[in-house]
Image (cartoon, rainbow, N blue to C red):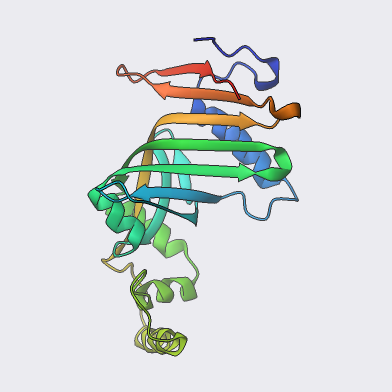
Amino acid sequence: MEEQTSPMNGSVDDPIAMFASWYSEARAHSGIADASAVNLATSTGEGRPSSRMVLLKGYDAQGFVIYTNLGSRKATELAGNPRAALCFYWEPLGKQVRVEGLTERVTDAEADTYFASRPLASRIGAWASKQSTRLESRAKLLARVARYTASFAVGEVNRPPFWSGFRIVPDRMEFWTNAEYRLHDRIVFEKADSGDWRRYLLYP
C-alpha cells in the first residue's frame, strides 16, 4: 500500500504523537467548545451496537481513558465485548480521528486519582446515579442527590466501588482531514503483531 508522504501531514510515524498534535490544536481553537468530547461506540456480545458522546479524560502511549458507572450500558457491553471505537470530530478544523481497539479497566489507583479531581457535586452525583437504569422521576434522582449530600456532609467523598474507568488500547487509528471536492486525506495506522505501527493511505 502507498506510504504517506503528504507534506501537509509531516512525517509523524507515531499515531499517539500525531493525535497529541491535533488534540492540542483543537483545545486551543476558540470555536471548539470541548475538544475532549468524543463518540464512544460499543456492542453487545451478539453484535448489537450503541454509541454515545463521552469525555476523554486522559491519553498516553497505552491508550485513551474514559470513566463511567460500572452498571452503565457502555460498561455492561464492554464486559461482554471488550472491543470499542472512538470518533473525535473537530468541525472548525476539518479534522476527525477514529480509534479502534480492545478495552481494559484502569487501575484502582488511576480511578481514585481521577475521581478525587472531580468537583464535589460530581463526586456526589456518581454515588446518587444508578446510571442507565430506569428512573421513576427527576424528583427521585434529586432526592437521592440530597440524601448522599447529607451523608457526606462531613468526611471525604471517596470513589464508589461501582465507578471506574476504561482504557481503549488502540490497534487501529485513522486521521481524516477535510479537502475540496470530497477528496479528503485519510491516514491509517495499524498495529502489527510485532507491536510496530504500519502507516498507509486510504482513498477518500
Residue drawn where x is 27% and y is 66% of the image: 162
The image shows residue 194 at horizontal and vertical percentages of 31, 16
**Residue 159 vs residue 93: left or right?**
left
Is residue 116 positioned above or below 17 on the image? below
Residue drawn where x is 41% and y is 36% of the image: 100
Q: Is residue 11 in view from this perspective?
A: yes
Report the number of discs: 0
Residue drawn where x is 41% and y is 90% of the image: 143
Q: Quadrant of residue 153?
A: bottom left
**Residue 94 vs residue 65: left or right?**
right
Is residue 26 positioned above or below 114 on the image? above
Q: Quadrant of residue 136?
A: bottom left
- Quarter of the picture containing the C terminus is top right
Residue closest to the eye, 90 or 27: 90
Residue closest to the eye, 27 or 81: 81
The image shows residue 84 at horizontal and vertical percentages of 37, 43
Is residue 169 positioned above or below 65 on the image? above
Q: Is residue 179 in view from this perspective?
A: no
Is residue 193 positioned above or below 168 on the image? above
